[in-house]
Amino acid sequence: MPKQILHKFRINNISPDTLDKERERTVRRILAIVQKINVFEVGSTAVAGVIGKQDLDFLVLVTADEFDSVRSALDKAFARNPHQLSNDYFQGYTVESELDIAIQLTIKGSQYDNFLEFLTVLRESAALRHEYNALKLKFNGALMADYQDAKHEFITRVLALN
C-alpha cells in the first residue's frame, strides 16, 4: 500500500459541530449514490475517548456481487485515494471537505473487513483505548508513514486477540 511519506500525523481538536455537519453531509452524499448499502463511521471519532486527527472515516460494506457497481458509482463522485490500497476487494476514497474525510469500500467477509471488529474491541476495552491513545500521542508530529506502521502493528495485534 502506498504511504504518505512527507505528511505528518497531528492530533487535532475539531469542534463537535463541525464534525457533526461534515458527518451528516458525507453520509447523505454516500447514501444518495449507493442507496440500501451499509455505511458505518469508523476510525477514532467513532469511539468515545479515543484521540486523533479528528478526521472522519467511513466504511461502505458491500457483498462481492455489489463491489464493482458500487465502486463505479463512488468513482463518479469521489476521488480515489492514491495513498490507500486499490484492488478487487478494497478501494479508498477522499472526500472534498474542510476536514480530512475518507471512505473505505470493502467486501463483507474479505480480509479487509475488520474495521467494525476493531472498533468493537476498542469500545469494550478501556486498556486498549488507553494504549491506542498513547500510541497516537507518541507519534504526534511524527511522519505519517511511521504512525501508520505503528498503527497497523497495533491493529493487527488487537485483532489477533479476538
Image: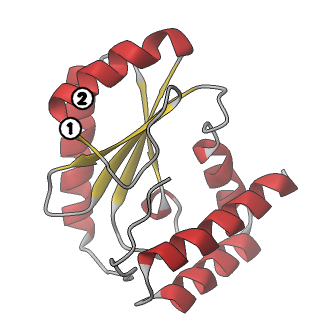
Q: Which mark is residue 78?
A: 1
- Give the residue furthest to the right: 161
Can you give x and y, in whole percent of width and height, for residue 158 in the image?
76, 61
Q: Which mark is residue 75?
A: 2
Q: Residue at x 34, y 78 (%)?
A: 6
Pick the residue in front: 124 or 154: 154
Q: Look at label 2 and name its amino acid.
A: Asp
Pick the residue in front: 111 or 136: 111
- Give the residue furthest to the top: 65
Q: Residue at x 40, y 16 (%)?
A: 68
Asked if residue 27 lies left or right of residue 3, the reply is left
Q: Is residue 155 above or below residue 115?
A: below
Camera sees residue 134: yes
Q: Look at label 1 and name its amino acid.
A: Phe
Asked if residue 29 lies left or right of residue 102, the reply is left
Can you give x and y, in whole percent of width and height, for residue 83 in the image?
37, 55
Asked if residue 158 lies left or right of residue 84, the reply is right
Asked if residue 132 lies left or right of residue 5, the reply is right
Asked if the residue at tag 2 contacts the one at tag 1, i.e. Cβ–Cβ closer than 8 Å, the answer is yes
Label 2 secondary element: helix
Determine which quarter of the picture holds residue 111. top right
Determine crowd level at label 1: few under 14, some 14-19, many 20+ residues with C-alpha closer than 10 A.
some
Label 1 secondary element: loop
Pick the residue in front: 14 or 71: 71
Q: Residue at x 15, y 51 (%)?
A: 96
Q: Is residue 153 above or below residue 30?
A: below
